[in-house]
Structure formats: structure tokens, C-alpha cells
Amino acid sequence: MNTRPTILLVDPRYYDVKYRINPWMQPALWARDPQGMQWAAVQAFNELKLALQGVGCNVMVAMGTAGLPDMVFPANAAIVLDGRALVARFRYPQRQGEEVEFLKLFKGLQSCGLLSAVEQLPESCYQEGAGDCIWDAHRHLFWAAYGPRSSEAALERISAFFSQEVVPMELASERCYHLDVCFCLLSGGEILYYPPALTAKALQHLRERVAPDLLIEATEDDLRHFSINAVSVDRKLVMGKTTSRLRGILKERGYETIEVDLSPFMLSGGGAYCMTLRLDRSSAARVTPHVEAKMVTA
């Protein structure tokens, strides 16, 4: 039986930065040398792909669509668990064209037997995929954000579709417009997070469920490096170029950082996790006792 993580990437040939829908996006900088920036993005993408393969991932690469540059961030495309995919609805018009393309992609994966069910959220029920809804196999629940991009109303639909507990995590900053910008689950059960990105209620939900010694606080510098936006595979973390402070903390906890220069994608507000979507997550692969599925009230 193959237990290697299966990761979806989207080819960057149509990637660019021409609009601004989050505070990190820098279309003016991209416009100085679009050809050079695009070349650098392709190189960075290839390095990320090799890094993921190097830590044992099966990597699938889907084609993007002209005019939809942010398809290169498939973490926002859907939530996937137990072979079931709940396809996103995007808040901003610049990304709404991705909905049809990703729905076709996931239906194709279903026809190939890689997914067993594909459904899409209703229109105007905004929810931007695994970037705002992160599965925690250690605690057998979803950490699901709402605020800048995803709506609070989507939380109940996520819980019903997957029959899993959903913990609401309200985001407090436009800079952390998705949960994956400020919140990363590590394979040993630790959570790397940036506290100012979360409301007091969200921090309470987190601290009620996670022991203090498993919480790793990130700094503003870590946030700027998109170091929290990482892909955890066993004791390895694939991420952009990180800070020496965080690298040392992770090493002390037994983690190895595999660092790739993802600066072309940081110009659009994305890092390693944003650029990936894991397709094989299973609720059966848990390391803590099962808890009854429920919705937690915000």
C-alpha cells in the first residue's frame, strides 16, 4: 500500500502579479521585469517540486488557465479529506474564474478514482479551501478560519460534508488573509502560529485544545518570510527561505527545514503551503482518540 503523500501543484506558466487583493501583492514590482519574474517563478516552482519529491511526496502537476494567475495556489481550491473534495468559492472576482476550472479538475480526479466525491459550496458561501481549513490528524478536527476571505457560514457546511469537528478561527488581520499564512501543523503535533493574526476567541480555542509545549510562536519576521506557510512531511518542513531563529527552534525539536527561494510567489502573498494541495489526507490516520463530530460555536 502506498503511503507517500500525494500533492497537487499547478504549473506556473500563466502566473503573474497584475492586481492586488491582499496586502502582500506587488504588481508594480512584477511590472518592472515581467519576463524575468516569470522565468524566476518557473525556476522556483521546479525547485519546490523537486524538494517535495525529495521528502517522499508523489507530485501531480495540473495545467493552469490563461488569465487566472492565482491558480498556482491550489491550497485555496478545495478541502480534501477521505477522498472527498469540497470545492471553494472565492470572495474576489479576480479569482472566481478558478471555480469552474478547479471543479473540472477535481471531477477529472474523481473519474480517475483518485477522489470518491466532489461537491461545491453554494454561491456566495465564500470558503477558500485548505488555505482556510486545515486538518489536524493529531486532534482529529479541522481548524477553520473565517474573516478576510472565508465566511463564518461555511463552517457548518464543512462540518456536515466531512462529519468532522470544526473549530472556528477568526482572523484578525488582512495581512493574514488565509489561515495558512499564520498557522502551520507539524507532524509531531506542534502548531507553529503567529498570535497577532488571531482574535482573542480564536486564541482561546487554540489554547484549550493544544498543550502549551506544543505551541510555537512565530514572529513578525517569520511572517514576512512566509515561514509559517510550510509543508510538513514527517520530520521535514518544505518552506521558503526562513529565519535563523525559527530554523534553530525547529532543529531543536527534531525538524529539518528544506528551504526553497519562493520570492516570486511571495510577491503575490503565497508560500510553499499555498502552492500545494494534499489529496490523500485520511481521518483514519489519527494519533489521538476519536472525538464525536460537532460544531464548535464561535
Image (cartoon, rainbow, N blue to C red):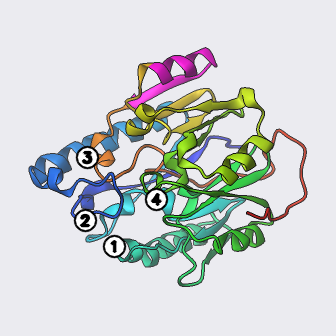
- Per the rendering, the mark at residue 41 is 3
Circle 2/circle 1 CB separation < 8 Å: yes
Dot placed on the residue nearer the N-terminal end, 2 or 1: 2
- Per the rendering, the mark at residue 94 is 1
Q: Residue at x 58, y 22 (%)?
A: 255
Q: Residue furthest left?
A: 32
Circle 1/circle 4 CB separation < 8 Å: no
Instruction: Look at the image and give the residue range highlighted in magenta.
Output: 245-259
Q: Is residue 121 left or right of residue 212?
A: left
- Per the rendering, the mark at residue 286 is none
- Find residue 14 and report its horizontal and vertical position in percent: 26, 62
Quadrant location of residue 233? Answer: top right
Q: CA distance from mark 2 to mark 1?
A: 8 Å
Dot placed on the residue nearer the N-terminal end, 4 or 3: 3
What kind of element bears circle 3? helix
Disc 3 marks which amino acid? Ala
- The residue wearing badge 4 is 74
- The residue wearing badge 2 is 19
Q: CA distance from mark 1 to mark 4?
A: 15 Å
Please name whichever residue, 291 or 8, is drawn nearer the observer in this view of the structure.
291
What kind of element bears circle 1? helix
Q: Nearer the viewer, mark 1 or mark 3?
A: 1
Please name whichever residue, 170 or 52, is drawn nearer the observer in this view of the structure.
170
Q: Residues within 10 Å of mark 3 (few under 14, many from 20)?
A: many
Please name whichever residue, 247 or 87, is drawn nearer the observer in this view of the structure.
247
Disc 2 marks which amino acid? Tyr
